[in-house]
Amino acid sequence: MAERDPFVSFLFLAFLFFFFFLVYDPVLALGGRNHGGGGCGLGAADPRLQTYIVHVEQPEGAAFTDLEERDAWYRSFLPVDAAADGGLREPRWVHSYYEVLSGFAARLTEEEVAVMEKEGFLRAFPDTVVPLATTHTPEFLGLHQGSGLWGTGAGGGRLGEGVIVGMLDSGITPGHPSFGDDDMPLPPSRWKGSCQPPEFCNKKIIGARNFVTDNDPEKASPADEDGHGTHTASTVAGSFVRGASVLGSAKGTASGIAPRAHLAIYKVCGIDRCKSSDILAGMDAAVADGVDVLSLSLGGDSMPFYSDMIAIGAFGANKRGVFVSCAAGNSGPEMETVSNDAPWILTVAASTMDRSIVATVNLGDGSKFEGQSAFQPSGFTHESLPLVFPGSVEEPSAPIYCGQGSLVGFDVKGKVVVCQRGGYVANVAKGAAVLGAGGASMIIVNRELEANTTEATAHVLPASHVSFAAGTKIINYINASSHPTASISFEGTKLGLSSYLPAPAVASFSSRGPSVSSPGILKPDVLGPGDNVLAAWPFPVGPPSKNTGSKGASFNVISGTSMAAPHLSGVAALLKSAHPDWSPAAIKSAIMTTADVRGNDGELIKDENSEPASLFDIGAGHVNASRAADPGLVYDLGTSDYVAYICSLGYTDEQVAAVVGQRGACAAVKSISGGELNYPSISVTLRSMSPKVAVNRTVTNVGEAGETYKVEVEEPAGVAVSVNPQTLKFSEVKEKQSFTVSFTKRGRAHGSLQGNLRWVSAKHAVRSSISITVE
Ligand SMILES: *[C@@H]1O[C@H](CO)[C@@H](O)[C@H](O)[C@H]1NC(C)=O
Ligand SMILES: *[C@@H]1O[C@H](CO)[C@@H](O)[C@H](O)[C@H]1NC(C)=O
Ligand SMILES: *[C@@H]1O[C@H](CO)[C@@H](O)[C@H](O)[C@H]1NC(C)=O
Ligand SMILES: *[C@@H]1O[C@H](CO)[C@@H](O)[C@H](O)[C@H]1NC(C)=O
């Protein structure tokens, strides 16, 4: 069984592989699918050949009349031998890139790359290969039919109409009711994309192409063999589907966040893996086709931007006005794990929401623990059964994770079996192992790092997933009791404040800042729902006997920052539809400066331990889609600002060129630090040599003419913050005003500090998170 637990797999594989940012994959866990198992996709090919992404710089003044001419120029970089495929007898060409970068991907030997020194050659980067990392969410984002962005007021009512969202993922399930096009308008006339094959498309899915190169060419179709791409696409822009549920739980009308937006599908991942050369090809095509928003629920580790193909592709997309939303990664709760962290990307962290699908564990001693399961069997006997933990608390060994076959030799027949989360075994797979060994039901207990984040999984048997604290008590009870027993009672879907946990809370798996490659920018940017998200799914789920969902029309509840990013892509589509003239940076600013910092208990948003979350967990806070429609002021940024920032990172001219596309870019601009970039959050470092730092910001009025804003500051403990001027008066819409924020260390302040800066008018409050590191 392949590993899907990102906590471990990221550590081992991050340098080689990319991941879908999905926490677990129930379908995979059912063991019904073939994982291809074929190494790096190069198969039995000539071992001398490897795929390289080659960046080239168009000679000054050179203009190509068409793509064919440009391709011929690209091919001229190949060694003569390779161009003729001489000797190696294999197709060498993989992809051409025209939009997000100039260059191509080709299969080359190391020697061939070493001699590729023709004028215009910038860099050759070896490809990285990559096995993989809603009924309620719209309301939870503050979207209600008839109000706000879903309403009829200013900026409302369009539900994403006219906007095209490009999905870089594992493909799509055409014909699923979430992709019905009953109420959809025709695609905008500017749309240049295509459908291969044509039967994948309608007015909802307007483009679908496969970019996965290591597939059998016969099978190269945008069909989703994984489920991930179908789930994320329906989260962004699924149509309204009445009576959606998973095995009867979480019932309601399912819809994406932008139900009238169009979807363009770029299949860049097969089951479990994606290659950066294919991801780049998908991004390149999406920009050429005319998408407005790109949604990527995949990625590797944080790395310098010149080595990060998603950062490079996103830079090119941003330059063309395309908004890029990416998953932050599932390597939490450790610090410095956030990926997809370039400032021109919206980096999305994952939170829980105020819905739980309750499965309560009742122990023989009378204690009760609330857990979750999406499978809520109605005919299950609630009587107490013997309770076992197939392992030892002192010596944790393999069986505690209930891996496939690991329970052989343990007497679990007819018992309630306790399994620990993790250990390379997906939650559904644990259930399959317990069921296979004759167990009656299962309790999954969190490890310490997962704390209070539990999953409502579509299990194959009666089960409950409980917190670390509850799990510890359950295990202690087993240890202390001669005849431990337990039962599970299923209490259905509960909305609102749960019995003990406020929402949203940061999900344990959500990757944390600070950013390694770009420490001057606070990352992640924002928190969105990513835990227990219900959306479309290609395959039936749950116990084999209960597979009621017909093939191609089911729903599933899954978790990951993969699920959070498409919520934000949907919000970006709503904003783009409501404000077609806003730049990607303006949309990002609107989302960030209006985000919520408090949960439904009125307190500051908590982390997985129920402790107040840090800015490195939540960035600006939890998206509030209805407020984002009318932010009042925005912090805008353009390509030249990002170039000025890249120029402060100490890269060589060639490395800068790999991101921005041309040499000599830094000679033309004055470089600026991360703190000085006109970002909607502020991150600065105070050192004993420089205990005072000042940064400038410029805001653009997108509210009303004649609004006056006054500044309010929550100072981080130990740092004095002063703002000049303290009042900003706008006489016109689109007017820009600048201000300076000065930070001065006081006393012995040290470490990571946080505060807030707010511009407040009669109608708007525009908040920036302030993150200060005092060294
Ligand atoms: C979002 O903002 C609105 C308007 O300020 C507020 O009423 C609401 O509570 C916020 N949160 C959610 C989840 O809707
Ligand atoms: C989870 O939440 C509860 C209640 O807020 C808290 O008491 C507990 O310590 C938390 N942490 C863990 C590890 O379960
Ligand atoms: C389990 O019980 C034994 C004694 O029966 C005790 O020594 C041990 O510390 C207990 N372990 C835990 C985790 O409670
Ligand atoms: C910030 O603005 C002030 C006042 O306009 C100006 O003097 C200063 O040079 C600016 N600083 C930077 C880094 O641009």
Image (cartoon, grey):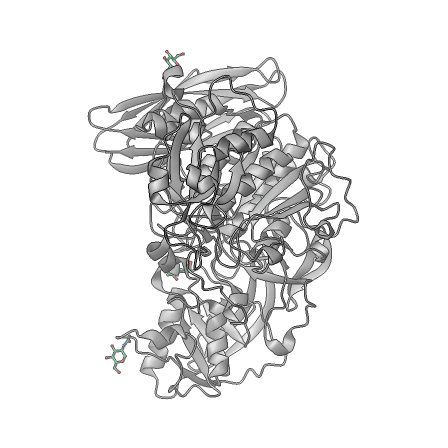
Tell me if residue 485 can be seen: yes
**Residue 293 location, x and y as percent?**
59, 37
Out of 630 and 721, give the one closest to the viewer: 630
Q: Quadrant of the N terminus?
A: bottom left
Query: Residue, x 51% and y 48% (percent of image)?
Result: 297
Out of 746 and 306, give the one closest to the viewer: 306
**Residue 56 location, x and y as percent?**
44, 30
619 in relation to 427, above or below:
above
692 in relation to 46, above or below:
above
**Residue 93 location, x and y as percent?**
50, 43
Q: Classify residue 667 as left or right of residue 689.
A: right
Tell me if residue 327 can be seen: no
Out of 767 and 293, give the one closest to the viewer: 293
Q: Name the outermost residue toward the right.
A: 182
Query: Residue, x 56% and y 53% (percent of image)?
Result: 170
Q: Quadrant of the C terminus?
A: top left
Out of 485 and 188, give the one closest to the viewer: 188
**Residue 596 location, x and y as percent?**
51, 40
Q: Quadrant of residue 343?
A: top left
314 in relation to 706, above or below:
below
Q: Classify residue 251 as left or right of residue 78.
A: right
What is the count of numbered marks?
Answer: 0
Query: Residue, x 55% and y 37% (percent of image)?
Result: 284
Query: Residue, x 57% and y 67% (percent of image)?
Result: 374
Q: Quadrant of residue 291?
A: top right
709 in relation to 238, above or below:
above
Q: Classify residue 350 as left or right of residue 706.
A: left
